[in-house]
Amino acid sequence: MTSNALINQIEVPARQARVVELAAGESARIVDVEGGQVGDVFAFNRHDPSEYLSAAHTRGHLSKLFPEPGEQFVTNQRRAILALVADDSPGRHDMLIPACDPARYRALGVKGWHASCAQNLQEALASVGVDIETVPQPVNVFMDIPVSDAGNLAWMPASTRPGDSVTFRSELDCLLVVSACPQDLVDINGGVPKPLGIEVLSAPTP
C-alpha cells in the first residue's frame, strides 16, 4: 500500500476559516504554523449537511473526552465521519467548549464587530452553497482546557510548537471547516491569533 500523497495545501489566515471537500478515505492534516494557535474543526456530510460531527455524540460513543489515534468521531446520527489518524502535537485538544460567537464577545465587553468561529463557519459553508441555522459544537484542536477533580475548567494557552499537527481521515464524503480561532480576550491563543494550515492527503492505494 502506498502512502498518502499531498493533494492540496490551504492557508487558514488568522481569525478566518476555510472549507475543504474530502472524499471518503482522504485525510486532512491541520498544522499549527507558528505554534500556540487553536483551531475549531467542523465536519458535515457532503451530501446531507444536516448530518454533522457531534462532539456530544462522540463523547458518548467513546466514553471519553477526546479520541486517541485510531479512534473515530461520530455524527449526530451516530455514524463515523472522521478518524484521528495521527497526533504530532502535545496532544491537548478539547470537545467541551462551544465555538466563540458574537454573544460571547459581547459578554467579554466587546463593543461592535469581532470575528468569531461561529460566523467563520457560516461564511465558509456559504462559499460552497451550504446554509446552516445552528452552529454545532466544534472539535477544538490544540486547545488546552484541563478539568479539575472538582469539575472546574481552566483556559490555558495552547502548548503547540511551530509545525505541530493533527491528522484526520474522512470516513465519508464530507465538508471539513477549520477556523483559526480569533479569540484574543481569553488567553488560549497567547493573546494574538495566528494562521493555521490544511494539507489534504489522498487515500492510500493498494
Image (cartoon, rainbow, N blue to C red):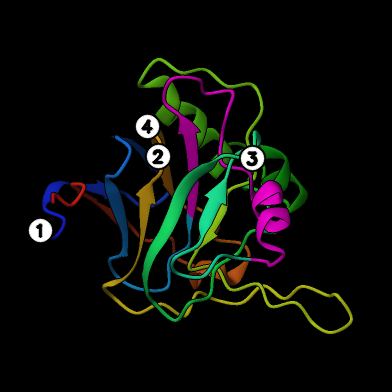
- Residue 176's tag is 2
The local crowd at label 3, few if under 14, some if 14 to 19, many if 20 or more residues have their Cα within 10 Å, is some
Instruction: Confirm or deny contact between disc 2 and disc 3 (CB under 8 A).
Output: no
Residue depicted at 46% across the width and 18% down the height = 130
Give 45 or 177, whichever is nearer the viewer: 45
Label located before the other in sequence (4 or 1): 1
Q: Which residue is mark 3?
A: 78
Label located before the other in sequence (4 or 3): 3
Please state the extent of the stretch shown in magenta in the rendering. 40-65
Instruction: Confirm or deny contact between disc 2 and disc 4 (CB under 8 A).
Output: no
Label 4 and label 3: CA atoms lie apart by 15 Å
Label 2 and label 3: CA atoms lie apart by 18 Å
Label 3 and label 1: CA atoms lie apart by 31 Å
Instruction: Confirm or deny contact between disc 1 and disc 2 (CB under 8 A).
Output: no
How many marks overall? 4
- Residue 2's tag is 1
Instruction: Confirm or deny contact between disc 4 and disc 3 (CB under 8 A).
Output: no
Label 1 and label 2: CA atoms lie apart by 24 Å
Q: Residue 65: x percent and y percent?
A: 67, 66
Q: Which residue is mark 4?
A: 173
| Vertical arrangement, residue 111 with respect to residue 192, above or below | above
| Vertical arrangement, residue 112 with respect to residue 65, above or below | above
Label 2 and label 4: CA atoms lie apart by 10 Å
